[in-house]
Image (spheres, rainbow, N blue to C red):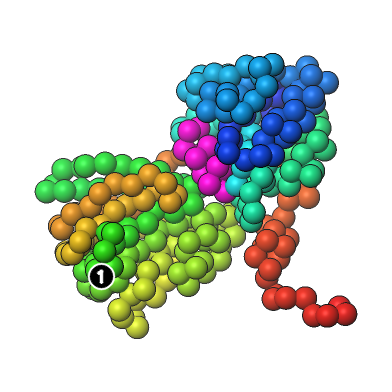
Amino acid sequence: MTDSLASIGTIGLFGNPAKAELPAAVKVIKDQCTRFGTRLFASTDLEAALAKDVSCVPNPELVKVADVVVALGGDGTMLRAARVLGLSGVPLLGVNLGSLGYLTDVPVQELEEAIKILLAGKCHLDRRARVYGSVWRNGQRLAGTNALNDLVVNMGSLPRALDMELTLDGDSLGRFLGDGIIVSTPTGSTAYSLSAGGPICHPSVLGLIISPICPHSLGMRPLIVSKDTKIELILHETGEGASLTTDGQKAIELADGDRVVFREADNEVALVKFPQSHFYRVLRHKLNWGGTKRLGS
């Protein structure tokens, strides 16, 4: 779902302080904020990497004061920023200081023009679904977590296959052995799920993607299910242990007998998009859709 972006009085900065390009990128944003009369705050995580003329505040305060948060880094930085924003609904814009940067909409070379367009109010919001997972042990809820890309159940540090059972709306698809399972949003369909053989979904698709990881069964294939489907994974035997990871960053340890229940989350992430932002164009450019270019073409 898309809608318009409200006027921006304050920009918040979140980023990867290890990126050498960060100080120069922040200076570009600060110059444009000065020109447009827009306030600028940065996360205290960036304080050591920035000039003293940029005010830094803790992440919870940054979320409260910002009308939009600009994430400077790669896709990992975008995913961390989405987690920091939580349920706030504050829009998120990604600036690519990394390599692939599939989620980051703005190449650093186009940053100045992008900020001008942003502050002129010529962007729109693309609201992306999240996936929610809860862990149950002995009938008690142990933990819960949201992800923008995916939730992944993985085997432990030693390569021992997991004995799992997948049920959809209470109907069992049977037990199987494998390295784990990925439950992704349409946004996450171009990430780990794609590497595991899952399909690519347009972000507007109302559903979730289930992609088994190296299943020892020819019948356990990736599935696209309705967003209202109750997905449940029962861990019958974990061998050397297992974990549930959130966007590849936050981990919850799992044990034999645990149940992990997945569904579409109640809250969305609002991504800032530009007039030239097109899903299929990004697919072609960043994932090299269609293969390599022939010589002379």
Judge whether 134 appears above or below 56 on screen.
Answer: below
How far across and down, in percent of the image, does residue 70 sit?
A: 64, 34
Residue 234 appears in view? yes
Residue that appears at 15% across and 57% down: 257
How far across and down, in percent of the image, does residue 169 sit?
A: 29, 60
Q: Residues within 10 Å of mark 1 (few under 14, many from 20)?
A: many
Predominant secondary structure, magenta span: helix
How far across and down, in percent of the image, does residue 189 sit?
A: 52, 61
Q: Is residue 79 magenta?
A: yes
Image quadrant in which the C terminus is located: bottom right
Judge whether 62 appears above or below 295 on screen.
Answer: above
The magenta-colored residue range is 75-85
Q: Is residue 78 magenta?
A: yes
Residue 63 appears in view? no
Residue that appears at 16% across and 43% down: 140
Amino acid type of disc 1? Ala
**Residue with the mark numbered 1:** 161
Q: Nearer the viewer, residue 121 or 17?
A: 17
**Total tally of numbered discs in the picture:** 1
How far across and down, in percent of the image, does residue 177 sit?
A: 25, 73
In the image, farthest residue toward the bottom: 218
In the image, farthest residue toward the left: 138
Q: Is residue 281 left or right of residue 144?
A: right
Check disc 1 and report its element: helix, strand or loop: loop
Q: Nearer the viewer, residue 293 or 48?
A: 48
Q: Is residue 133 left or right of residue 92?
A: left
